[in-house]
Each structure stands twice: as C-alpha cells, then as structure tokens.
C-alpha cells in the first residue's frame, strides 16, 4: 500500500504528502502548484469555473477525458488518475478548442473561460455527441455571466468529436497508470483507497467510524461549505468489481461506483425511464463523478434516482466481510437520511429488472428550473396490464413527498384491478393525499407538492398512451428557437 497520493498532472508524475486529505484538487492546483488558470466560482459544483479533465478508461464509449468540478474533488480521489488542467492545452500553439472559442467570440471577461475550454475539451474527444441536446448537456454545467451562450455553443459545435491527432489522443490510446492501494495519513486524518474487498473490510474493521466516499459530489460539500474535517475516509474507487455495469438476464446490474454519465449512456437504449431521469440530473461534470451508490446512500428524500428504482422494483445488494445480502429498494430507506445498511456494510450494486416492452413506465422531475435544479417532487411510475386490460401490477414511487423516497401504497391499491383509463388514473391520483403529508419548505409548499403529485399520476395515462415507455423529446419545447432560428 502506498502512503503518498500519486497521480499524473498535465503529463507529469506528482507525489503529494503533508497536506490534509480533504484538500480539494482546486485548492491544491491554485495554492500549492500556482496553476491559477483553474478558477473558483461557487465551490459547490454549480458554476463550472473550476472544470478540469480526468482520464476515465472504463466507460461504455471507451477511454475518454471527463470534465469534472475540481472544487469538489478531494485530492486522494485523484490517486492513480491522470488529470489535465487548462495550462496543459497550449503546446507550441493553442489547442483547437481554444482557437474555436476565440473564433466564435466566446469570451469576454474570461473568468468562466478556462472552465468552458475544459468542457469543450471533453466534447472535442467524445465520439457520441450526435444530437443537439447532447451538446447542451455537455456545456450546461458552465455558467457565463457576460458572453452569452450562443457563441460558446457555436464553438463547441465546431470542435465536438473532431479528436485532433497529437499528444492528447496518444494519452487515450495508452494504458495509463495501474491502480495502487493508498493508505494516506496526515496529522489526525486518514484516507484509504483499498483495491480489494479484503483490504476494504480490514480498513472498515479498523476504523468503524470511517466514512465511505465515491464521487464526493455530496460529501465534498461538507468539506467546502461546512468545513468538516473527516478523521477517516475510505474511497471505493479502487475496487474494479464495484465499477461493473452489465445487462444480464433482463436485469441491469449497476455497480455502486458506476458514474451517472455512463449509466445514462447505457440506459438510453436499455432502460429509458432511468435515462429520462438522468437527463435532468445535475450537469455533465457532476454526472461524470456522481455514482448510483452515493445517490442512494445519502438517502436524501429528494434524491432523483430512488423514485424510478422504486417503480422498477430494483434491489440493492449490500456487502460486508460476511458476504452479500439483498434488500428490496422499498425497504432500503428506513428514516430521514438513514438506510438499512449495517455498520461495516457497503452498497455494492443495484440490481434493476428491465421493464418488459408492454409495461407502462414513466419518470418525472418537477423543479423550479428545468436544468440543474433540485426536485420539489420526483416520481417513477410502473404499471402492467393483464389480458383483459386491467391493471395487474402498479408501483408508484415518489421523492420529495415524505422523509424518505417512498411508494404510494394507496394510489397503487386504487389502480390494481381497474381498467387502464384516464378516469382510473384521475381517481387513483386522489389517494396521494392519504399516502403523503408533504412539508412546506423553500422549494415548494405542501399544497403544491400534493397537487403536482396528483397531476403526475393523472397525467401518467396520457404520457404513456402513444409509447408505453416514452423517451424525452430531443429538445423540450422551451429551448426551441422559433422563426428561422437554428434548431
Ligand atoms: C451541483 C450538484 C448538482 C446535483 N444534482 C443532483 C440531482 O439533480 N439529483 C440528485 O438526486 N442529486 C443531485 N446531486 C447530489 C449528488 O450529486 C448525488 O446524490 C450523487 O449521486 C452522489 O454520488 P457521489 O458518488 O458523489 O456520493 P458521495 O458524495 O461520494 O457520497 C454520498 C454519501 O453516500 C455514502 N456512500 C457513497 N457510496 C456508498 C456506498 N457504495 N455504500 C455505502 N455508502 C456510500 C457516503 O458515505 C456519503 O455519505 C447534486 C450535487 C451537486 C453538487
Ligand atoms: S467552483 Fe463552481 S463548480 Fe467548482
Ligand atoms: S466571459 Fe465573463 S463570465 Fe463568461
């Protein structure tokens, strides 16, 4: 096991010792390395000013550069990785993405520009940016106060998928560093990156209060906003078994550390309802880091994946030194921000049955803003009909309606055995009031939450009329440019 954090920064090996393991990559770059091209805006993953790229080799599209928010990335999470900042792009000449942004007049004050460039850099080497919404999705995590987004989008359109030959393409075709276990200690803090389950469960036995971490898109906020200094953190990113994503026997088996960008990619064809929810989940930089394990284990009542997984009847596989046990997702959330995981147990994978073609399935997220916002209400709905057209199975999951994500038992009971009609759904929607007593908070009132939940149940019928598992339209209407504007 190594005692120092080791990774590659802009093509050079780096060894880090003597820094707190909760130092963020952004602070390390700016304060220790004086690489001040990378900027800080919000320090909470919302603005994209701090964007850098990390090489990921295991995604469904093969090796690629992934734009990530360095403000949330704890330094030990870079262990064994290759990181590039804006400073690396210029060689004897500027990189084509920099030329493209200049030519499109895509920068004014320039504060957002390094982050914009790094998101464009990911776009430049992606091979799957074949639709307008994907370009929007690629860039929507980069805020710009002064230039306006059209020139930035024009420049991204120019360079997306061009993959210019040269040293960066060589990085993607090389094998990259071999992951090594890490046991990093600094003063009273410890950060471990085990590479086998034996090492993992040994560390958890030694430090029963250790906090697990994956993408750190939640936990990073405790560091940057609440200034928590964790005594012991254990990252799961060194365990290859947890990063597997496969379809087997009509089930999607999702390893705990699979990131949500990869999950969305695979679900677009295999599980449209999950892909539909992931479309409006955070920005590309967040989805490149956030994991399904972290999303379920933070047990947030407004986590977006739980309602869809409740509707799909998913199961969570927990693992400890004793072995594995399976928990139906409906039994996983046991209280406000509490899960059924026992001490020493981790969430290892999610086993999600793929819905049969004729099952009606919907996924909905209602928030104040369509993109990059937190849900007021999220829902997943699943209905099967028998040969007579009567509802034989109904699973309706909600987030934002109670202290935990939960199924609407009374709505489900009101659907079962009934003919699948608009009237049935409208009648069943009334049962939302007996299933949930939502709260008023700054995101929405209890009245609004109830009303929205009822409308979603009633609207589910119409939404699944033409296609039982509707995908999102490529461009939701509010972003269409009318009267001769470009699509
Ligand atoms: C800007 C921004 C936008 C966001 N947008 C959304 C959104 O649209 N919808 C949404 O639902 N969430 C959103 N989030 C929240 C967050 O990104 C997700 O919940 C994400 O999936 C968390 O995954 P992670 O790997 O980063 O978790 P981490 O931060 O690494 O961990 C979160 C928690 O889970 C625990 N944990 C992690 N993995 C495991 C495991 N395998 N076993 C046991 N415990 C584990 C950790 O100990 C920690 O307590 C957003 C966050 C940010 C910063
Ligand atoms: S500083 Fe705003 S996303 Fe990191
Ligand atoms: S150019 Fe000023 S914030 Fe984007």
Image (cartoon, rainbow, N blue to C red):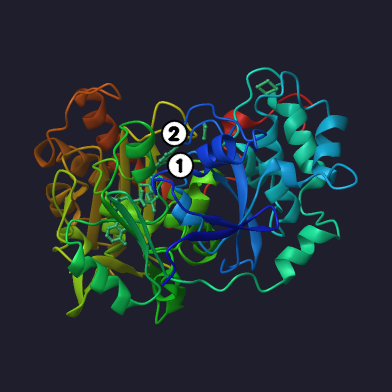
- Residue for point 43% across, 43% down: 23
In which quadrant is the C terminus drawn?
top right
Q: Position of residue 470 (x, y in %)?
A: 48, 53
Image-quarter location of ligand 3: top right
Q: Can residue 168 be seen in this view?
A: yes
In which quadrant is the N terminus drawn?
bottom left
Q: How crowded is mark 1: few (under 14 residues within 10 Å), some or many (20 or more)?
A: many
Q: Where is residue 113 in the image (x, y as percent from the top left)?
A: 70, 30
Give 333 or 414, whichever is nearer the viewer.
333
Ligand 1 neighbours mark 2 (CB distance < 8 Å):
yes
Q: Distance between the residues labelled 1 and 2?
A: 7 Å
Question: Secondary structure beneath disc 1?
Answer: loop
Q: How crowded is mark 2: few (under 14 residues within 10 Å), some or many (20 or more)?
A: many
Instruction: Say above or below: 200 vs 367.
Output: below
* Label annotation for residue 24: none
Q: Relative to residue 237, is residue 441 drawn left or right?
A: left
Residue at the spot of label 2: 44
Q: Can residue 345 be seen in this view?
A: no
Ligand 1 neighbours mark 1 (CB distance < 8 Å):
yes
* Label annotation for residue 72: 1
Tag 1 near tag 2, CB within 8 Å: yes
Instruction: Say above or below: 436 vs 146.
Output: below
Q: Relative to residue 152, is residue 421 drawn left or right?
A: left
Q: Where is residue 177 in the image (x, y as percent from the top left)?
A: 60, 70
- Residue for point 64% across, 33% down: 36
Q: Earlier in the sequence, mark 1 or mark 2?
A: 2
Question: Secondary structure beneath disc 2?
Answer: loop
Give 4 or 140, whichever is nearer the viewer.
4
Quarter of the figure with residue 313:
bottom left
- Residue for point 42% across, 55% down: 273
Q: Position of residue 199 (x, y in %)?
A: 31, 75
């Amino acid at each position: 096991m190594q005692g120092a954090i080791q990774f590659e920064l802009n093509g050079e090996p780096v060894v880090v010792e003597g820094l707190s393991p909760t130092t963020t990559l952004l602070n390390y770059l700016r304060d220790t390395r004086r690489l001040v091209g990378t900027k800080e805006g919000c320090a909470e993953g919302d603005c994209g000013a701090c964007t850098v790229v990390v090489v990921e080799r295991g995604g469904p599209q093969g090796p690629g550069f992934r734009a990530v928010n360095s403000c949330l990335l704890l330094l030990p999470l870079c262990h064994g990785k290759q990181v590039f900042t804006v400073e690396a792009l210029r060689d004897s000449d500027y990189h084509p993405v920099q030329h493209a942004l200049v030519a499109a007049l895509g920068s004014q004050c320039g504060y957002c520009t390094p982050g914009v460039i790094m998101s464009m850099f990911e776009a430049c080497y992606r091979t799957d940016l074949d639709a307008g919404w994907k370009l929007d999705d690629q860039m929507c995590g980069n805020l710009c106060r002064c230039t306006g987004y059209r020139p930035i989008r024009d420049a991204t359109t120019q360079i997306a998928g061009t993959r210019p030959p040269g040293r960066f393409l060589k990085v993607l075709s090389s094998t990259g560093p071999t992951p090594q276990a890490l046991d990093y200690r600094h003063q009273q803090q410890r950060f471990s990156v085990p590479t086998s389950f034996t090492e993992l469960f040994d560390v958890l036995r030694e430090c029963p209060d250790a906090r697990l971490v994956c993408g750190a898109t939640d936990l990073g906020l405790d560091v940057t906003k609440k200034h928590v200094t964790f005594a012991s953190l254990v990252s799961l990113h060194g365990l290859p078994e947890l990063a597997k994503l496969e379809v087997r026997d009509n089930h999607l088996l999702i390893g705990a550390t699979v990131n949500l960008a990869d999950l969305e990619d695979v679900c677009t064809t295999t599980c449209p309802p999950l892909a539909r929810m992931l479309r409006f989940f955070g920005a590309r930089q967040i989805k490149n880091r956030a994991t399904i394990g972290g999303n379920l284990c933070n047990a947030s009542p407004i986590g977006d994946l739980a309602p869809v997984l409740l509707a799909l009847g998913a199961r969570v596989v927990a693992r400890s030194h004793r072995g594995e046990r399976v928990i139906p997702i409906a039994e996983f959330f046991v209280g406000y921000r509490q899960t059924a995981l026992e001490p020493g147990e981790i969430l290892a994978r999610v086993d999600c049955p793929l819905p049969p073609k004729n099952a009606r399935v919907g996924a909905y997220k209602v928030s104040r803003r369509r993109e990059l916002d937190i849900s007021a209400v999220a829902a997943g709905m699943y209905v099967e009909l028998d040969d007579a057209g009567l509802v034989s199975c109904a699973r309706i999951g909600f987030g934002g309606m109670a202290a935990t994500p939960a199924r609407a038992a009374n709505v489900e009971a009101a659907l079962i055995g009934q003919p699948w009609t608009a009237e049935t759904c409208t009648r069943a929607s009334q049962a939302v009031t007996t299933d949930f007593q939502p709260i008023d908070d700054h995101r929405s009132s209890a009245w609004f939450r109830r009303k929205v939940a009822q409308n979603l149940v009633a609207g589910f019928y119409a939404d699944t009329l033409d296609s039982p598992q509707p995908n999102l339209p490529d461009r939701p209407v509010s972003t269409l440019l009318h009267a001769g504007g470009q699509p």
